[in-house]
Amino acid sequence: MTVSTRFPSLRWTARLTNLVLPARCPLCAGRSLDRCSGLFCNDCRARYLADPAERCPRCALGLTGLSSLCGRCLTTAPAFDASYAATHYQPPIDLLVRRLKFGAQLPLAAAFAAALLEPLRRRRLDDYDLVLPVPLSADRLAERGFNQAMEIARPLARALGLPLAAQACVRVRDTTPQSMLALADRKDNMRGAFAVRDRAAVSGRRVLVIDDVMTTGHTLDALAACLKRHGATQVVNAVFARTPLR
């Protein structure tokens, strides 16, 4: 993946990715990668990451009509203010996400961070004050051994030159994984799941929240509501992949 010289730390990320990951594109499993091209071959990058479709600026769902917001956000506005996604959560991108989350292929996180730079350039970089990964519960973190959102947020925060507020917010309730629940049950599942333990870190700040996947948006909505109750002035989501809900 080509990395802008405006973000020098991600040039090293791309080089590290090339050293650790296979020399062939993991999406098409065929084409060899150039030395500094990053995770995907040029064809797969254009096919899966260009994402020319219009998205709702609030929740990053694809737009099909002429409205500036999707129907969901027009009906019930979420607590967050904007969302950006690098690609759709669908085959074969979903396999890469699962390799990171459940296969502990951590170098993928740096590549996901690099992919997020393009949608984030739609805003001025000084529109954010800090980067905050979606926290895992203590039990889930102990079971998995890492937080995939943190692994994406760390190189992204370095590239953007923003502080990483890794400990400002915690998940205080070990919720049922959202993927195991019906869509109608996911909002209730996240109720009271988060708590801010460092109000000074978020009060009066514009927070850039990082996660790997956004499906219904209920997790990010609950987190944004918690941050705003503790004084955050704006919450913007940056997710690698967005599920194209129907």
Image (cartoon, grey):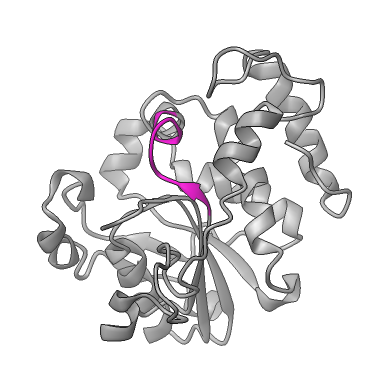
Compared to residue 8, the image places residue 143 above or below, namely above
Looking at the picture, tell me which residue is in the foreground, 3 or 28. Answer: 28
Residue 132 lies, in percent from the top left, at: 52, 62
Q: Picture quarter containing residue 160? A: bottom right
Judged left or right of residue 40, residue 134 is left
Can residue 231 be seen in the rendering of this structure?
A: yes
Residue 24 lies, in percent from the top left, at: 64, 14
Residue that sits furthest to the front in the current view = 65
Looking at the picture, tell me which residue is in the foreground, 98 or 175. Answer: 98
Compared to residue 29, the image places residue 86 above or below, namely below
Looking at the picture, tell me which residue is in the foreground, 173 or 224. Answer: 224
> Which residue is located at x 43 percent, y 42 percent?
147
Residue 210 lies, in percent from the top left, at: 51, 57
Any magenta on residue 237?
no
Compared to residue 141, the image places residue 236 above or below, namely below
Q: Picture quarter containing residue 102? A: top left
Can residue 163 be seen in the rendering of this structure?
A: no
**Which image quadrant: the N terminus?**
top right
Any magenta on residue 91?
yes
Looking at the picture, tell me which residue is in the foreground, 131 or 46. Answer: 46
Judged left or right of residue 68, residue 22 is right
> Which residue is located at x 15 percent, y 44 percent?
180
Residue 128 lies, in percent from the top left, at: 65, 73
> Which residue is located at x 26 percent, y 58 percent?
246
Residue that sits furthest to the right in the current view = 5
Q: Picture quarter containing residue 207? A: bottom right
Count all numbered tags in the image, as a single digit. 0
- Give the extent of the magenta segment: 86-95
Compared to residue 125, the image places residue 140 above or below, namely above
Judged left or right of residue 231, residue 24 is right
> Which residue is located at x 30 percent, y 77 percent?
71
